[in-house]
Image: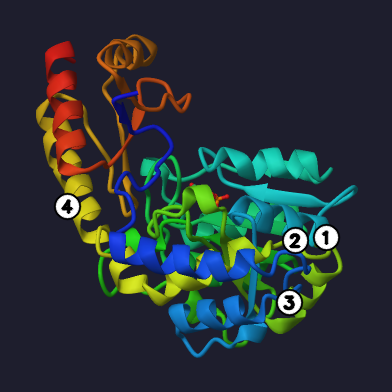
Amino acid sequence: MRVALNVNENTHVIPEAAVTDIVAALAVAVRGVNRYPDREFTELRDSLASYLGHGLTPDNIWAANGSNEILQQILMAFGGSGRSVLGFPPTYSMHSIIANGTGTTWVGAERDAEYGISPATVVRAIERVDPDVVFLCSPNNPTGTPLHLDTIAAAYAATRGILVVDEAYAEFMPDGQPTALTLLPGRERLIVSRTMSKAFAFAGARVGYLAADPAVTDALRLVRLPYHLSSLTQAAAIAALANAPAMLAMVDDIKQQRDRLLIELPKLGYPTGLSWSNFVLFGGVADPHAVWEALLEQGILIRDVGIAHHLRVTAGTEAETTTFLEALARIGA
Ligand SMILES: *Cc1c(COP(=O)(O)O)cnc(C)c1O
């Protein structure tokens, strides 16, 4: 595939200086792989707490092989048979898939117009469903829609259950926008989930993590498999986090390409909503499958997320984004 813009990866490779550090850390770790890894991944939790800031300590941090495993562990601990999880489709497809896989009943509730969720909407759904777990995705995938903190705070106040805010795309939010991390103090049932897959360009390494009250991380210790994070994963992630500024240097470029998509797609006849992530959902597509296939024939892979008359495209490098926009213009609305 010439241009892969279908799964919201960071399409930039990681910087050479970071590669050198990661390889050096892996070389040390390999010499110790006859031993089991640090099952408490203390140094990694320390690095993640420093990266997140907000006064978080290693006791607030948990990590796993991708945030998908984080979400699975959360539902193993707090969901399961006879329990329910509330979500707001269209949203990240893995939320309901992981619910099903853990035997947790998935209940979908409606969003407002333009895919937003107001405090009143979230409270009404929670009062109707009385879920054990609530999943909110901020910004939302596949729509890119921001979620305001007042909705998260209202959801927390309304539910007796665990509230999970999936912030996989937090680093792509506009500068200075507060994250759900700011709501953690005093909210011991709130979990903020993050990943190194997107902004850190680390999708292949499989590192997801969360910040929450230490009682939450203690509950996850009961369901994780022993030694679930390999010493190679831990070493690579620690070295990558030590290079955070370089690893995140491409985020601004990607945000520029996302903003370019938000400007150019409507000019081509494809309206968009607001996006605070590294992808854009665009509408006005008469036949999404036909457009998806016409792009594929030109070596460009994007995503048909199953929303009528819409397609989703990841912001790529400047060259990839240009290739996509030019091909789409040729296909016509
Ligand atoms: C991509 C994505 C993830 C990341 O999953 P990993 O398992 O960490 O690669 C999590 N949540 C959402 C909403 C995503 O779009």
Say which mark, if any, is on residue 40.
3
Disc 2 CB within 8 Å of nearest ligand 1 atom: no
Disc 1 CB within 8 Å of nearest ligand 1 atom: no
Per the image, the residue denoted by label 2 is 228
Tag 1 near tag 2, CB within 8 Å: yes
* Residue nearest the viewer, comparing 256 with 241: 241
Within 10 Å of disc 1 (Cα), the crowding (few <14, some 14-19, many 20+) is few
**Which of the two discs, 2 and 4, labels the residue nearer the N terminus?**
2
Q: Describe the element under mark 3 as helix, strand or loop.
A: loop
- Tell me the kind of residue under disc 4: Gln
Q: In this view, does 280 lie to the left or right of 105?
A: left
Nearer the camera: disc 4 or disc 1: 1
Disc 3 CB within 8 Å of nearest ligand 1 atom: no
Per the image, the residue denoted by label 4 is 256
Say which mark, if any, is on residue 225.
1
Whether 114 is drawn above or below 323: the answer is below
Q: Quadrant of residue 283?
A: top left
**Which of the two discs, 3 and 4, labels the residue nearer the N terminus?**
3
What is the distance, in whole Å, between disc 3 and disc 4 at their CAs? 38 Å
Residue at horizontal 37%, vertical 61%? 19
